[in-house]
Image (cartoon, rainbow, N blue to C red):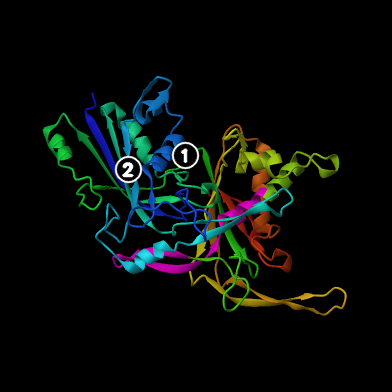
Amino acid sequence: MHTHRYLARFIIEAETPLFVGSGQASLLKDALVQKDCNGFPMINGTSLAGVLRNALASNEWIDSIFGFANGDKGNGSLLKVSSAYMLLNESDVSEGIAEYRDDKLINKFNNLPSRQHVRINHKGVAAEKGLFDNEVVYKGVRFVFELELRGTKNDETSWNSIVNQTQSPNFRIGSGTRNGYGSLKVLKLYNKTFDLTQKSDFDAYLNFNPSFNAKLDWKEVRSELITNDAFTQYSFILKPDLFFVFSEGFGDDEADNRPLEEEVAIYRNNTIEFDKQTIIPASSIKGAISHRVAFHYNRITEQFADYDKGKTGIDNDAVVALFGKAGKDNDSKVVDAQAGNVFINDFYFMDKQISNKKIFNHVAIDRFTGGAMAGALFSEKVSSIGTGNFNFDVFVKLSDTIDANIVNAFEAALTDICKGLLPLGGMTTKGHGMFTGSVLRNGTKLYNYDNK
């Protein structure tokens, strides 16, 4: 007998760009995000349910609450997960056919930013036919969704585990969650339990208005980031030596190439405002670390190239254990795939922190004549920080099965960045992208450049 109803409503914010694919493409973009009938981004309830179930799969109660099917046996889910709908301002939700209409806002979401990607082969260069792009939802966009569990008093512990999971660092939605996408932050949490054996709770549950636009008189529960022993948090405090650039792949009216910039959604004055910021993409950081991890793991385990044992990419055990690998297609089924255990967020700079005004002019030199090649003049815009440092975090899911040599190789790669031995971004052969600083593990310093 299900005597209790557990309900929780969440207001979440995208800490990084979000990509929940619709399976569609356009003439300009290879992959488009999921949108509702009003043209605003949304997150399907099936995506939320799948992430929650996967994260909680080790619990013995998982099948009884989330349901299961095994041949002719099984049971339905006791947990109802709504889709997440976008907040149009600080109070209105894009639910149903919205009466609220702001043509300027609709135009913003009709032209979402896109991210360029290229698949790198084991030689460190672009793979053939490896260029693609995808649409992303702005960082800062907020959504509302709801969970409801039919159960008994004994399900309270399970319910608390489900609610807490939404505040874990691995609660990420959509594609590219290991490349900086889909990190969500719980801004507000409303949690209510109805005991249907009590008349007051029974009447309150019957009269509950499920609309996200209805006023909710529940008491707000304090939300905070929940971590567990499976995650190790590495933190960087970095300062660029001079200039660095993470390129957008094309230029503007001032230069032929410019740093990657993207607008960020900010909820202010009961509307959504947009601020353009410079980005360090997580995928760029991840790629550099992955390559250096392979080097250090080969060094530590004495797998040297002259013995034909040194391995890179998915052939390297450390790279696979930390960063995962794509599966191979076998009769329309993906096999031998492995998800990564390293979570890195895109890093955004505020306007006051960074300058993109420095332009370097270049010309290609003819090696025969020693003079400039015709039509080979080009310019590149780079980034610099006026004062101060910048910090970003890396979460690593370490298990007992991960070899200590793999952890040592990973920490050595992070230390190389802080020593200025591993440049990041583009134009590194021209002296850009050198950083120094310190790296911490769970708050304890592993290395500090200033105290070397």
Nearer to us in this view, 158 or 374: 374
Q: Nearer the viewer, mark 2 or mark 1?
A: 2
* Extreme residue toward the top, this view: 72
Q: Is residue 7 magenta?
A: no
- At horizontal 44% and vertical 59% (from top left) the residue drawn is 139
Label ID, residue 228: 1
Using a 10 Å C-alpha cutoff, classify the residue at mark 1 as few (fewer than 14 neighbours), some (14 to 19) or many (20 or more): few
Pinpoint residue 385: horizontal percent, then vertical percent. Answer: 57, 70
For the C terminus, the image quarter is: bottom right
Is residue 51 or residue 300 the one in the foreground? 51
When the figure is inspected, residue 104 is found, relative to residue 182, above or below; the finding is below
What residue span does the magenta drawing correspond to? Answer: 263-290
What residue is at 21 percent from the left and 28 percent from the top? 3
Q: In the image, residue 402 lies at what x, y percent?
A: 62, 35
Which residue sits furthest right?
368
Question: Closer to the camera, 31 or 448?
Answer: 31
* Residue corresponding to mark 2: 82
Amino acid residing under circle 1: Asn
Note whether 339 is above or below 427 in the view shown: above
So how many labels did they put on this image?
2
Cβ atoms at labels 2 and 1 below 8 Å apart: no
Could you tell me which residue is drawn at 43 percent across and 20 percent down?
71
Secondary structure of residue under mark 1: loop
- The reply, left or right, for residue 160 in relation to residue 280 is left
First in residue order: circle 2 vs circle 1: 2
Cα–Cα gap, marks 2 and 1: 26 Å
Q: Amino acid at mark 2?
A: Ser
